[in-house]
């Protein structure tokens, strides 16, 4: 399957964040993305990768805050709405970065198998 570089970098950064912020073992998936990226000169995408990582991390933190509020006995729905609007803004930034990446790279052929987190296979 061919996948845009923007999607590979996006999934890679999300997997990195998942590795850092959860107990899930995502080492196989990280290795998969690292191998796919190893065919490319990292200097061509490092800055964009860092921007995408930072944006995805910010989005992750906002989603954590939303989940924390939702788990309360009496959730503050106004706060949830404010965080949801923040997430919407961050996603716009994320899409702009992904568009910049897509405009800079061709699609890459990958042999990708979706990982089903939380399921015992």
Image (cartoon, rainbow, N blue to C red):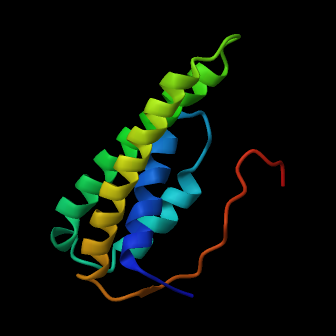
Q: Please determine whether, in this image, residue 15 is positioned above or below residue 60.
A: below
Q: Quadrant of residue 43?
A: bottom left
Q: Quadrant of residue 61?
A: top left
User: In the orientation shown, which residue stands out farthest toward the right?
Assistant: 121
Residue 21 visible in the snapshot: no
Residue 71 in the image: x percent, y percent?
67, 20
Which quadrant: the C terminus? bottom right
Residue 88 visible in the snapshot: yes
Residue at 83%, 48% (x, y): give it: 120
Residue at 33%, 89% (x, y): give it: 106
With 94 as the anchor, is 115 left or right in this view?
Answer: right
Residue 96 in the image: x percent, y percent?
29, 65
Q: Please determine whether, in this image, residue 55 is positioned above or below residue 67.
A: below
Between 62 and 21, the one nearer to me in the picture:
62
Residue at 31%, 73% (x, y): give it: 99
Residue 103 in the image: x percent, y percent?
26, 82
Between 106 and 95, the one nearer to me in the picture:
95
Q: Please determine whether, in this image, residue 114 is positioned above or below residue 104.
A: above
Which quadrant: the N terminus? bottom right
With 75 as the anchor, is 43 left or right in this view?
Answer: left
Between 34 and 89, the one nearer to me in the picture:
89
């Amino acid at each position: 399957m061919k996948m845009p570089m923007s999607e590979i970098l996006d999934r890679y950064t999300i997997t990195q964040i998942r590795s850092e912020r959860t107990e899930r073992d995502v080492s196989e998936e990280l290795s998969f993305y690292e191998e796919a990226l190893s065919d490319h000169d990292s200097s061509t995408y490092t800055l964009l990768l860092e921007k995408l990582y930072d944006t995805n991390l910010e989005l992750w933190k906002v989603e954590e805050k939303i989940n924390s509020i939702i788990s309360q006995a009496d959730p503050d729905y106004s706060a949830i709405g404010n965080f949801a609007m923040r997430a919407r803004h961050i996603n716009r930034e994320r899409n702009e970065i992904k568009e910049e990446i897509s405009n800079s790279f061709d699609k890459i052929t990958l042999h990708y198998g979706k990982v089903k987190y939380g399921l015992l296979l």
